[in-house]
Image (tube, helix red, strand yellow):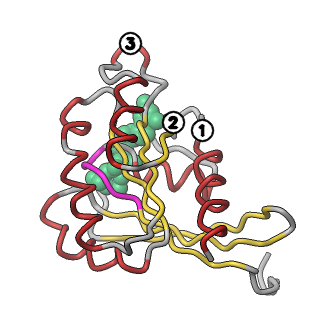
C-alpha cells in the first residue's frame, strides 16, 4: 500500500546468488520476493536486487537479495558485491552437468571475494524436470560437504523448497549477528 510506513526491521542482511547463466537465479529470487515464475528467459545484465521481509521468532528480518549475472563477462562487476553479503547461494541446474562442474569456480570466487564467515548454501535447481535430471541428490550432497555449504534442491518453477532455503539463510545469519 502506498504511503504505508513499515517499522524498522530487527535485522537486515544481504544475500548474493551466484552460479552459471540460466540455472534459475533470477527465478529463485522472483519466486521468493514476488511469488511468481516467468517461463521466458531473459539474462540478467550485471546485478539486480529485490527485498523481502520475513518474521522469524518474533523478529523482523529484511532480506536484500542480490541477483547476479551468470555470464562470465560480468564477473568483475558482480564480485564487487560479494563482500557485503552475509550469505551466498551458489546454484546449479540439476539437468545441466556443466553447471555442476563449474561449482568449484564459483566457490573459489567466493573464497577470494566474500567475507570469511559468509553462510554458504548450495542449491540444485529445476527438480521439477524429473525426466531431464542428470545430477542426483547424492552428488549434490557430496559437493555441498566438500565446499562446506548447506544443501537444498529446489524448483523455482513449481515453488519447491525456495522458501525453506531463504528461511534457513535468515536463521543461520541471525545466529552470527
Ligand atoms: P542469468 O541471469 O543469465 O545468470 O540466468 P539465471 O540463472 O538468472 O536464470 P533464470 O532465472 O533467468 O532462468 C533461466 C531459465 O530457466 C528461464 O527460462 C526460467 O523460466 C527457467 N527456470 C528457472 N527455474 C526453473 C525451475 O525451477 N524449473 C524449470 N523447469 N525451469 C526453470
Ligand atoms: Mg538472471
Q: Does the beta carbon of the residue at mark 3 sit less than 8 Å from ligand 1?
A: no
Residue reaching furthest to the right: 58
Q: Which residues are magenta?
A: 17-22
Q: Residues within 10 Å of mark 3 (few under 14, many from 20)?
A: few
In the displayed structure, would residue 66 be above or below residue 11?
above
Name the image quarter holding the C terminus. Answer: bottom right
Which quarter of the rendered image does ligand 1 occupy? top left
User: Circle 2 — which element?
Assistant: strand
User: Circle 3 — which element?
Assistant: helix
Q: Where residue 77 appears, x then y in whole percent?
A: 22, 76
Q: Answer with mark 2 or mark 1, whichever residue precedes in sequence.
A: 2
Q: Does the beta carbon of the residue at mark 2 sit less than 8 Å from ligand 1?
A: yes
Q: Where residue 107 appears, x then y in whole percent?
A: 27, 55
Q: Where residue 157 appears, x then y in whole percent?
A: 52, 36
User: Circle 1 is placed at which residue position?
Assistant: 161
Mark pair 2, 1: CA separation: 5 Å
Q: Residue at x 57, y 32 (%)?
A: 158
Q: Nearer the viewer, residue 18 or 41?
A: 18
In the displayed structure, would residue 41 be above or below residue 7?
above
Q: Nearer the viewer, residue 103 or 72?
A: 103
Is residue 42 in view from this perspective?
A: no
Q: Which mark is residue 154?
A: 2
Q: Residue at x 34, y 72 (%)?
A: 114
Amino acid at each position: 500500500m502506498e504511503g504505508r510506513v513499515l517499522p524498522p526491521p530487527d535485522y537486515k542482511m544481504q544475500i548474493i546468488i551466484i552460479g552459471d547463466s540460466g540455472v534459475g537465479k533470477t527465478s529463485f529470487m522472483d519466486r521468493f520476493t514476488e511469488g511468481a515464475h516467468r517461463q521466458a528467459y531473459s539474462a540478467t545484465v550485471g546485478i539486480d536486487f529485490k527485498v523481502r521481509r520475513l518474521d522469524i521468532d518474533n523478529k523482523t528480518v529484511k532480506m536484500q537479495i542480490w541477483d547476479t549475472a551468470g555470464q562470465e563477462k560480468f564477473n568483475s562487476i558482480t564480485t564487487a558485491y560479494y563482500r557485503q553479503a552475509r550469505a551466498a547461494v551458489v546454484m546449479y541446474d540439476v539437468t545441466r552437468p556443466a553447471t555442476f562442474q563449474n561449482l568449484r569456480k564459483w566457490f573459489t570466487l567466493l573464497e577470494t571475494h566474500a567475507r570469511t564467515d559468509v553462510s554458504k548454501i548450495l542449491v540444485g535447481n529445476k527438480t521439477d524436470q524429473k525426466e531431464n535430471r542428470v545430477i542426483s541428490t547424492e552428488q549434490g550432497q557430496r559437493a555441498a560437504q566438500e565446499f562446506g555449504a548447506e544443501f537444498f534442491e529446489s524448483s523455482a518453477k513449481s515453488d519447491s523448497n525456495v522458501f525453506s532455503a531463504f528461511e534457513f539463510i535468515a536463521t543461520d545469519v541471525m545466529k552470527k549477528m
